[in-house]
Amino acid sequence: MSIDLNACIGCNACVVACMAENNIPVVGKQQVMHEREMHWLRIDRYYEGSPEAPDMLFQPMLCQHCERAPCEIVCPVGATVHDEEGLNVMVYNRCVGTRFCSNNCPYKVRRFNYFAFAAEERRPAVARNPEVTVRARGVMEKCTFCLQRIAAARIDADAANRPVGAEEVQTACQAACPTQVFTFGNMAEGGQVVERKKSPLTYVVLDDQDTQPRVTYEARIRNDGSGAGA
Amino acid sequence: MSRQWRGLDRLSRDPAFVARASAEFPQLAAALAAPRDRRGVLKLMAAGLALAGLGGCDDGAPGGVLIPPVLPPTDTVFSGNQMFATASVVGGYANGILVRHANGRPIKVEGNPLHPASLGGTSAIGQAEILGFYDPDRSRGLIRKGEPQAWSSLLTAVAAQREAIRQSHGQGFRVLTGSTTSPTLARQIAALKQVYPDMQWHRWEPVSRDAVRAGALLAYGQPVELVAKLGAVDLLLTIDSDLFDSAPGHLRFARDFAARRNPTRTDRMNRAYAIEPTPTLTGVAADHRFIAGPRDLARIVPALAAAVTGGEQPADMPAWFAPLVADLKATRGRSFIHAGPAQPAAVHALVHAMNEALGGRGQTYDLIASVEADPVDHAASLRGLIDDMNGGRVTTLLIIDSNPVFTAPGFGEALGRVAVSMTLTDGPTETGAKTTWNLPARHGFEDWSDARAYDGTVTLLQPQARPLYDGISPHYLLALFAGPEEVNSRDVVRQTHGLNEQQWHDALATGLVAGTRTAPSDVALKPVQPAVPMPAAGDVTLLIRPDPHLLDGRYANNAWLQELPRPLTKLTWDNPLLVSPAIAERLKLTNGDQVTVANGGVGVTLPAWIMPGQAPDCVVALLGFGRSDVGMVGQGVGFDVYPLTAGRGPVSLHKADGRAVLASTEHHDPLFEDAGDYVHHGTPPHSRQIRPSSANQRSNRRNTTASLAGRLPGA
């Protein structure tokens, strides 16, 4: 996945799309104050400069699906592992809730079900996406790159005896984004995401951790070449 | 490069904050200190799970909770995903959406790639509509004076009303709706006026676009609407604008703007300037953001107009003024200026004049005849209604999809003088609780309707499921007032557009009626010199704005939107008063301190939140919270600031006793990097260099500056 910060306007459509697609519960004000909100995808907002007139910068933050994932090496039960497509996957049924993975994640994108948030939701169960497991209390969860969408495309591709196309899968955040911030694809087949990752603006967050994430970002460029200010 | 920071407490290195954030478990102390029954506070408990209206979908699992299996049972046949087009309508304007159905039930909203206002994108509100559809707090059954009634009693009551209204030629019969673009609704109301010539149709939208409309009237003598063509805009100037977050067509505008932002993929990167009192998404996306309070704007905008249209060089302007004017003139025919709905009509008229003078018309924007049906000034329309209600001149009042008891101070008192009042609404509202009848409306996903997009494209809304709860549509109710026949809203909508079988099929499949975009108008600019009113001087200027996600409060019962961190403040479940850093300094405020803000004689006490980048004299009150009758999620969340809209100044602000704890996520999940350079950014082709990065991205370690040189306008 590649995320273009030049396009991001911070509108939050991707965050709600992720909640709808992945059966993410709300937790209520009290639990938000305990830092227990469950959003798999959040938009970090940074200020730079003085409080009177700062620059404001958005950076969507989700599981980076690291090649050298700090979460995987600390899990005592092998509940978070790599799959052969390069995803960092959670096996909910193995998770015993040690939260070591979350503590070791430098991006702080893992979410823990401190309570049975999903079971306590007021919306009827029929409102949920039937293709996404509803997580129980005591289980860690995080962005899956919309694994159910990848699986659906893989089944189609297998049936036709061909590889999954470069841009066959759209994640929920990518589909919802009004400004096409996200690019996602099967890099083995080339396509736009490969092109974007070659952009001179591409960087990874927390480079010094050497986690080798599969999410890269394109730096924001401000076009103040001439004219006023700056 | 200075360090990037997330919250003011972080910036000021508040020792308590630093200690807490660097503890291994930052949330632990608060959690341990909370009382054991803390979950009771949430009101999100499973109380509502026994859903009467959904009994047919319950397989009898204990507690009524269905957990989708990891592997489906062996006899399950998966019917696949299907998409059906409809629209998400906000403030009357349609954004095309597709609703994804899994095994026959709607579960997810996607954008409609064929729709001009969406092009495949959606807004946060559009995405959250699916939760509103399944909201267990939605209205069920009709209620008269607090008592449930049978549907037959409504038919009897309306029949009696028809007779009474006919005898008075409709005098005393009033219909109140929000802003609407629906051709079918407009046609039905026109038909009602044929039957009852003296009836009146009032409009009220609390987040008003009155100034936009009045500005167009000043400049052109007609309520024309703007259609920006941002793909052709090299230079965008926004003045306190909602262009990317809530203006009709905002998704499309954001798409077109963003398509020309990445210099590695476009050789025509656009440039954006924003002048605004409080940060907006449009301003944050701009290359230059200039902070100006309302009093500054009232001085700067006329000066800008004089400089652009007349070539004057006004004195006593900020340092950025002259270069901005030069840049505007250098991009003649490729620039566009946009003002937001909070700006007065005169500013809109001046912006129209500047856009004409800069030669953008037809190039960077079009003017089209009003998309809104029968456009009127909403404030005047509602004021007229309240006066007539108080004067006893209203006998029958029909309120469709509007909540004036909550959003218009003074309406609730006047309502007591109306003999028969009806509210049609799909959820509990303060208005529905006060009118004689409270009629349950169908959700937009349950019935047929239509609406137009920002460019006039007619968009069809088709039902996505059978109604979860008993309800009626506005089309059915209006037809019932016109005559005794009960109509099917599908037939009414179809009659409006007169499409043949194939065209109707295509319109439903694509979600829009082909070829219905409004053609550009050739109306000429009137030579007027509108005077921008100077806001009253004072220590504090009060701005009243809609919440980014709840808008005027209509989405207050949507838990996804309530818990969605607001784009800039990252606040959830609350609407503190946004104060500027300068005011916070003067009153010695920190985030959460209670303050009392008063406008004229009306005061509201609520917590304060310091908003970096806000004009020094400004405080911003956010509408949409403090609903008292809305359902279990939104009830009593936040503070109702609508009373402040009735005040006519002067504005005062005092520190009050006490503190409130606010749930902002801005300091949650902190990343730690020594340099504090989390978001890489730069200004090509010179100055600050982007730090290309990563061990696995070594091939990208090229000189950003060199590779970008010559690809930017003005480079």
Image (spheres, rainbow, N blue to C red):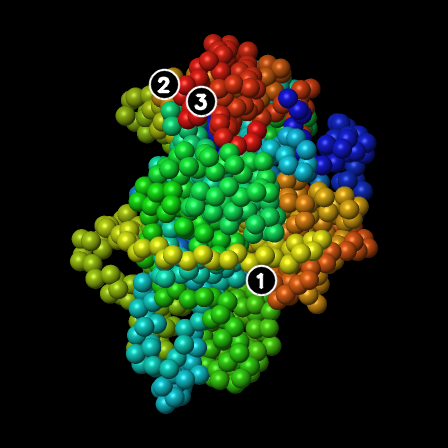
Query: Mark 2, residues whose alpha carbon is within 10 Å: few (<14), some, or many (≥20)?
Result: few
The relative height of residue B612 versus residue B672 in the rendered view (above or below) is below
User: Horizontal and vertical percent for residue B564?
Assistant: 58, 44
Locate residue A40: give its quadrant.
top right
The span from disc 1 to disc 2 (Cα, nearest Å) is: 50 Å
Name the subunit of mark 3: B
SS state under label 2: loop
User: Horizontal and vertical percent for residue B365?
Assistant: 35, 45
Q: Amino acid at mark 3?
A: Ala
Q: Which residue is mark 3?
A: B715
The relative height of residue B32 versus residue B396 in the rendered view (above or below) is above
SS state under label 3: loop
Name the subunit of mark 2: A
Q: Which residue is mark 2?
A: A190
The span from disc 3 to disc 2 (Cα, nearest Å) is: 32 Å
* Front residue (pair B136, B505): B505
User: Horizontal and vertical percent for residue A202?
Assistant: 49, 19
Name the subunit of mark 1: B
Q: Which mark is residue B630?
A: 1
The image quadrant where one finds the C terminus of chain B is: top left
The span from disc 3 to disc 1 (Cα, nearest Å) is: 54 Å
